[in-house]
Image (cartoon, rainbow, N blue to C red):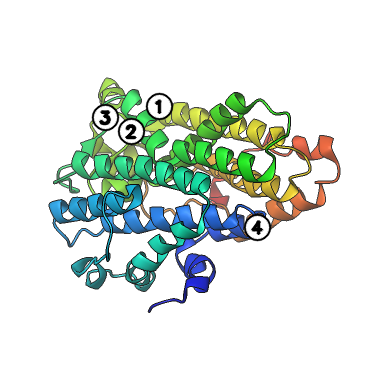
Amino acid sequence: MVYAPDQLLTSLLKEVSRSFYLTLRILPGKVRPQIGLAYLLARTTDTIADTQLIPLEQRLQAMQTLRDHLSGRRSGSLDLGELVSRQGSAAERTLLENCASIFALLDNLSAADRHLVVEVLITITSGQELDLRRFNGASVEHIFALRTDEELDDYTFRVAGCVGEFWTRICRSNLFPHALVNESLLIENGVRFGKGLQLVNILRDIPGDLRQGRCYLPEEKLIALGLPPKDLLLPANESRLRLLYNFYLDKAEAHLKAGWTYTTSLPRGCARLRLACAWPVLIGLETIQLLRVGNVLDARQKIKVPRRKLRQLILRSVLLYPWSRAWDQLALADRPLPSSSSS
């Protein structure tokens, strides 16, 4: 299905963005197109990277072609050919069908905003390409793992931490260019914010990733526990992993607390921007609490925050906003651990 240009950042984005669309809707109109476009472009390259029915080199070539278009080294039409027909998801097929029109939206941005969008996409695609090469040939019978914490930190920066920097710079220039803020600290915490969200995703998705042959927990840490990556396929080994797993949960929580510092450091008059940042922090912290008690190696368990709890978090953040002290404490209060039955 081909969308009209004015539908790309509305109907199409809603179709492919899942939970991010909620955040996007609350953003101020001055930055919504830039951030929405960056998201669509990132989802496009991610879809290409994940099309496993297409040979690796063909996917890498398609991603390079998109990068060349982004950087201006190549012009002309974008033809993704077989990649479109190989999509099992209707939404992802539609996304690739509209790829050329999505790229054309870059021309609607100011030179400064376009530069920021291109810059963050180049970094994201470098992480996606690194992922493809690192896990080439991986399967449930042959699980490949990251080697070190440094590799894990680098990966979370490339695919998410860089988004925190992009978000900060684009919002700063368009929404509060003259506000007195510590910009370097804001960017630092924005990067940690993105890393924290990605780390939560990694820790939540371990069973699914393992069945694709991917292990993002560093192998050197697992081997030190006597747990080669293949042993994580067995839910019974969760207790042996738990101490190390909690270490990474603590790291993710510390990153998200930095994300909350980031959120409360934004000018208070930017209420819509603050709420757009607050919701993923609050949801991420709630997800961490669930991960502290569920069996995180059991593929049958779908550990996620219930919709009723999501609505409560969002409503509370909106209702408390007029009271700055109470609102600023939303993510800092101690959260009781949920019972295992609630996960």
Q: Which is more N-terminal, label 3 or label 2?
A: 2
Question: Residue 153 location, x and y as percent?
Answer: 39, 29
Q: Mark 2 and mark 4 in contact? Answer it, CB < 8 Å.
A: no
Mark 1 sits on what residue?
A: 244
What is the C-alpha distance between the residues marked 2 and 4? 39 Å
Secondary structure under the numbered disc 1 in the rendered image = helix
Q: Which is more N-terminal, label 3 or label 4?
A: 4
- 152 relative to 162 in the view: left or right: left
Secondary structure under the numbered disc 2 in the rendered image = loop
Secondary structure under the numbered disc 3 in the rendered image = loop
Mark 2 sits on what residue?
A: 217
Compare residues 279 and 96 and report the one nearer the observer. 96
Q: Which is more N-terminal, label 1 or label 4?
A: 4
Q: Nearer the viewer, mark 4 or mark 3?
A: 4
Q: Which is more N-terminal, label 3 or label 1?
A: 3
Mark 3 sits on what residue?
A: 227
Callout 4 amino acid: Gly
Characterize the local packing of mark 4: few (<14), some (14-19) or many (20 or more) Cα atoms within 10 angstroms: few
Q: Mark 1 and mark 2 in contact? Answer it, CB < 8 Å.
A: yes
Residue 1, above or below 42: below
Mark 4 sits on what residue?
A: 29
Question: Residue 166 location, x and y as percent?
Answer: 51, 40
Callout 2 amino acid: Leu
- 28 relative to 135 in the view: left or right: right
| Quarter of the image that includes the N terminus | bottom left
